Amino acid sequence: MAYAAVVSLKETIQRFQKSSDNIIPPHIIQSAYDVVLSLQDIFKGLDSSINNRGKGMNALDEQIKETICELEQVLESHVSNQFNAQSKSHPTVDKVNLGVDSFIQRLRKLSQQLREEDDDDDDEDDASQIIEFSGKMVGVDDIFGRIKYYLLNGRGSATGIVSLVGMAGIGKTNLARELFEDQSISEYFDLRVWVTVGPNYNLQKLLHCILAQVNPQKDEKLEQGDMEKLLVKSLMDRKLLIVFDNIRGKKLSFDLERLLPDQCESGVMLTSRSKKAVYPESWFKFHHFMSKLNIKESWTLLRHKVFGEDQPCPYQLEKAGMKIADNCEGLPLAIVIVADILKTKEKTPEFWNMVAEKQNSVFEDAYEQMSKVLLPSYKYLPQHLKACFLYLSVFPPKSEIPCSKLFMLWIAEGFLERRQFKTLENIAMEYLKELDDENVIWFLQCSHNSGVKTCSLHSAFWHLCNREARKTRFSHVMNTCTEGLSQVLKGQRRLCVHNNVLFSIKDVHNSMASIPDARSLLCTGSFHQYPVPVCFGLKLLKILDALTIRFYEFPVEVMKLTRLKYLALTCNENVPDSISELFNLQCLIVNKHTSIKFSKNPSVLPIEIWDTKELKHLQVMGSNLRDPCGAILPNLLTLLNVGTDSCTENVLRGTPNLKKLGVHIELGLDDVIPVSLFDHISCLDKLESLKCVVVNPILEPEVIVYSLPRFPIYSSSLKKLTLSGFGYPWERMTLIKSLLVLDVLKLKNYAFHGPKWVTRRDDGFPSLRVLSIEDSDLVEWTAGRWSFPNVEYLTLKNCYKLQKMPREFSQLVKTIRVVDCSPFTEKGAKHIRDDQLSKKIGDIDIFVHSSWKA
């Protein structure tokens, strides 16, 4: 975790270098910066030096982290004291300088130790932790048959290379083993070789291992070049099947082509947890990503492991058994280990129900056993990903984590290193995709523009995350145990509360108040209907996430936490004028309690909000920005849940870099939507996403067209437009074509109103790639052949009256989703697919779901 501390300190020092109010001499600041850069370079080098992961290195990592955190605290305290005039305990200039210089000297010594560290105490190779599954595998019959056919018949005379990639415990090694030992395959290949590679890739050792199985009579004491020649000679004109199990890096892929002669009819299988290890996929003739089991397959595997393949499960246990299988979340390793535990326990409905509800230790014991297999997936992550991965444990198990929130937290924590020409948000997305490449997380919801909306951890990985975070004092999750809490919390920088009732326990509250080092307090449990006391005495807090706690009034104590970068609350009162005292604030989220409706006249944010110049994300439900009188928020990227008064020209010109705008409109019986709502959108020349929602639309047949807001037809940057509840006539759709780069269009809750929509060729949408229509009274939809030339994804939901839709659609369409629509809509989607097939354009995935049939 030292690397994340290094990156955070580097950003803190960079802020110092830009400030003109420092009492610390520039040469001391520069010395600290040089040491930090040196440490960062050394840590980056560790990613290519796998051996440096032993106990000695871990201890050194901990020392460096603690020293860096202490130095950062000294620097931040200096900044805080400068802005805290009422403090009477400011250290003198000399003391600050002396303290900083002392830390620099300590870091230099630790940096030298880190550079010289050559830890020979290798950890146990993770290859030894692979658990072999006995018995028949479940859910792999199809892929088993396809790979087998490919190895025997489908590759011609060329070398056939198969890659099996997936999460630890997903069954890669066992599938490869079944193929390796299959009778037809063993009879076809003259030689079969199995090599377990692991993280410590060494070509010379690898060649020794292969030759020992191919040509065991030869002396092993050969140079690498001689071994390569001998291997090529030994394989000439022979049929070879070789399995490289558990590969980590890319080096093996690059060596294979040289080692396998053209005259050898080879079949090669590689298994890896990392997608990058088998990149590029095009190089592999047969690439397969191992997916998790569905609930039916999970239950079958659990039943087989507990009772045997030929024995039924007692009917009294089936309901609980299905839930136990579901709780394994599709991971075969979890199912097998849970089954092994269940085999040794009483087989009664009472016990199995307790297991199903996780009311005993069965799953905890299983996760602990699994940690031995999963740990290398974390251990060998690149330095810059480790803190980001551990941070996922601050969310409760099985959480669907919003990526936008996760990114804001990572940024506020200082985990991300700035790069030229890239925003921190883009870097965060790169990090998340790297974690996905390493198969330690799951993407749950993905948008059609290659973005990811939500992600999740398997519960076994969450257990590993939480254990490692606690062990390294990275973070601490507070549940229900309060015994010895003060000692446990000592030195913790991040406190996570998954059960907010803990705040009402006096000793917990007091223990938290006594932690001077805490930087983050995250309350991510279930929502509390009634207020509970929150500890606001943690003066070094950078992050306070209390959305799950209800406040009747805005807690003014927050204004003393001047280091806050991320503040999220649920409060029914207005944001106070003193909000500008939080000069480091990057993200402000204030939700209203669900039982409180918006007032007819939305609240107004204080004019002082324009003084929070670091603000990137502003989301205050039902509030508007005042006229800034020439002030600007230069870093604001996201403005959500504001009313129509925030769409004036002066307000929008005060947010020149805004990329995402969400307008929330609640109408009374006699209210109308301001005609000028969209008139000034063109001021935002960087706006990419616009969402406007009318909460309670009044859709009258005699609605006057000119009384509706004019479209934002002059935006040159808008890529995504979501409209809901406006009731525009379908004829107005022709104006949207002027949005030349519009990629995604979502029309919800009668955004357009009326039975007929006709789109001619010259009224088409040339750039549109995603179209979604939800809750519509549309009956007949007619479109010319080239009206939607580039649409790839079409979604129709709750279009109960739709009877006719375009037969000829985009030639690029890939997916059509039909949810709770008329039978005619399903037929229309199939007609589009048939039309594509008849023209040999390609097949279309059609997903149809009807709630009344479920």
Image: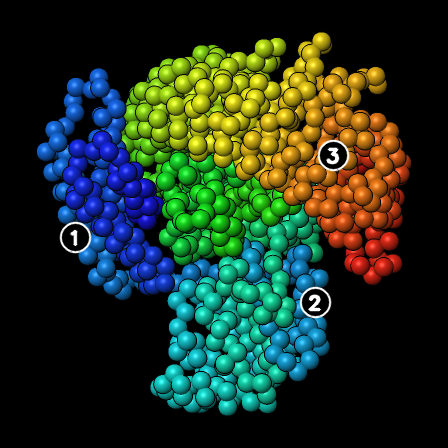
Element on which disc 1 rests: helix
Disc 3 marks a residue whose amino acid type is Leu
* Nearest to the observer: residue 25 or residue 368: 25
For disc 1, the marked residue is 109
- Write the residue at 77% across / 33% down: 733
Q: Nearer the viewer, mark 3 or mark 1?
A: 3
Residue 543 visible in the snapshot: no
Q: Earlier in the sequence, mark 3 or mark 1?
A: 1
Q: Position of residue 564 (x, y in %)?
A: 36, 28
Give the vertical position of 377 relative to 824 (above or below).
below
Rendered image: mark on residue 146: 2
Q: Where is the C terminus found, in terms of image quarters?
A: top right
Q: Residues within 10 Å of mark 1 (few under 14, many from 20)?
A: few
- Write the residue at 87% across / 40% down: 782
Element on which disc 2 rests: helix
> What is the C-alpha distance between the residues marked 3 and 1?
67 Å
User: Is residue 786 found left or right of 437 in the rendered image?
Assistant: right
Q: Earlier in the sequence, mark 3 or mark 2?
A: 2
Q: Position of residue 347 (x, y in %)?
A: 60, 42
* Nearest to the observer: residue 296 or residue 807: 807
Disc 1 marks a residue whose amino acid type is Lys
Element on which disc 3 rests: helix
Q: Which of the 4 image quadrants contains residue 744?
A: top right
> What is the C-alpha distance between the residues marked 3 and 2?
50 Å
- Write the residue at 56% across / 31% down: 683
> What is the C-alpha distance between the residues marked 1 and 2?
57 Å
User: Is residue 284 found left or right of 80 in the rendered image?
Assistant: right
For disc 3, the marked residue is 735
Q: Nearer the viewer, mark 3 or mark 2?
A: 3
Asked if the residue under mark 1 is in contact with the one under mark 3, i.e. CB atoms within 8 Å, the reply is no
